[in-house]
Image (cartoon, rainbow, N blue to C red):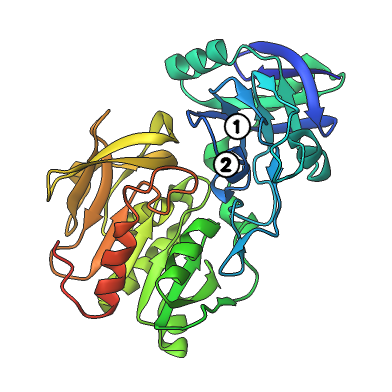
Amino acid sequence: MRASLILEDGSVFKGRGFGKEGIAYGEVVFTTGMVGYPEALTDPSYRGQILVMTYPLIGNYGVPSKKLEENGLPLHYESDRIQVEGFVVSRLMRENHWLSSKSLDKFLREENVPGIEGVDTRALVKKIREKGVMMGALCVGDHDEEEIIQKLHELSYEEMKLIDSVTPKDIIVHTPQNPQGRVVVVDCGIKYGILRELLKRGLEIIRMPCYEDPVVTMEEFQARGILFGNGPGNPRLLGELVKKAREVIDYGIPTMGICLGNQILAMANGAEIYKLKYGHRGINKPVKDLKSGRAFVTTQNHGYAIRAETLNEFRVWMRNIDDGSVEGIYHPQKPVIGVQFHPEASPGPLDTTWVFDIFTMMMGDEKHGL
């Protein structure tokens, strides 16, 4: 099928369609990961976005079976469905690994997501790096380009409150084999990798909708801590969640934020958030722990960052080695920490899974050393 990716600046990238025939709108972003496309496709933080893979050969190990589980959660998926609006690759591979359950093309068709291959992704990524992320339309089949460009000018990712489409409607409980305590997870579009790391540490998870009160939930279930998870969209639209995070900080219970959750905690303390030109997305992003002086390679997926000079009670814990942006914060008096990267590393390097150990120690009333 003929296909095209149309950007709001009028640029058109032609290619061949796969997955679902039709049209999808979203903010066009790129990730630098060479592997991990099943995890990336199912990451709820990509809701509202068209994802471009910089690595040229995608699909060469097919799509793994959801029957491969760890603690009752699928091992290679970050949610129960594909979350991206559309998928852009240079070359779609149709060979499958022996453990694959289906091809990538079939996976997208079943999930009603359009894809395009044969695109010069290097030129596309260069444009995004120079001009910044922008809205785009992925069209598989014949469509009116002028009409699409006009619609693109009417859309804004900045104005989309996307967490409403990924947060659960009711509380979900995940119980490990030998529970060692409970933790409340404020689900703004949580990755299953985060849940797997908590379950590994013997924590029963009370996964709550982001519009409910985490303090009330924590008291009701007698949980030891609260975790604000990742999620899609502009954090500046989440005023009510920020107010609830302020109450959590004041309460003094052990608390951790990851990605969007890190920004929510900072905003709850009065910090400002700004949008990065093209974001940090990939599995090779270097960060430095300012407390220990050690450097780590991390998995990241975010388009916003904390303005360091506006932090009040919080202190900067980690920095991005490439651009100096804030990658971690901590409260000097209270058991509250946050990281901008994804310590669960799904996909990605396992350098920073120890962050979950610090959170676990905090919930056990042990000194966390920050």
How far apart marks 2 and 1 lie (CA) works out to: 9 Å
Location of residue 65 in the rendering, given as x and y in whole percent from the top left corner: 71, 52
Give the residue type at disc 2: Ala
Q: Residue at (76%, 32%) from the top-left corner?
A: 114
Q: Residue at (67%, 31%) from the top-left corner?
A: 59
Q: Residue at (66%, 35%) from the top-left corner?
A: 61
Q: Can see residue 248?
A: yes
Left or right: residue 94 versus residue 288 is right
The image quarter containing residue 305 is top left
The image quarter containing residue 150 is top right
Location of residue 197 in the rendering, given as x and y in whole percent from the top left corner: 44, 63
Is there a contact, CB below 8 Å, between mark 2 and mark 1?
A: yes
Left or right: residue 213 versus residue 310 is right
Location of residue 46 in the rendering, given as x and y in whole percent from the top left corner: 57, 42
Does residue 40 lie above or below 195 as drawn?
Answer: above
Give the residue number, with chain letter if any, for mark 2. 40
Give the residue number, with chain letter if any, for mark 1. 51
In this orientation, which residue lies closer to the viewer: 76 or 330? 76
Left or right: residue 360 versus residue 281 is left
Give the residue type at disc 1: Leu
Q: Residue at (78%, 17%) from the top-left corner?
A: 16
Q: Earlier in the sequence, mark 2 or mark 1?
A: 2
Quarter of the C terminus within the rendering: bottom left
Q: SS of the residue at dot 1? A: strand
Disc 1: CA contacts within 10 A as few (<14), some (14-19) or many (>=20): many
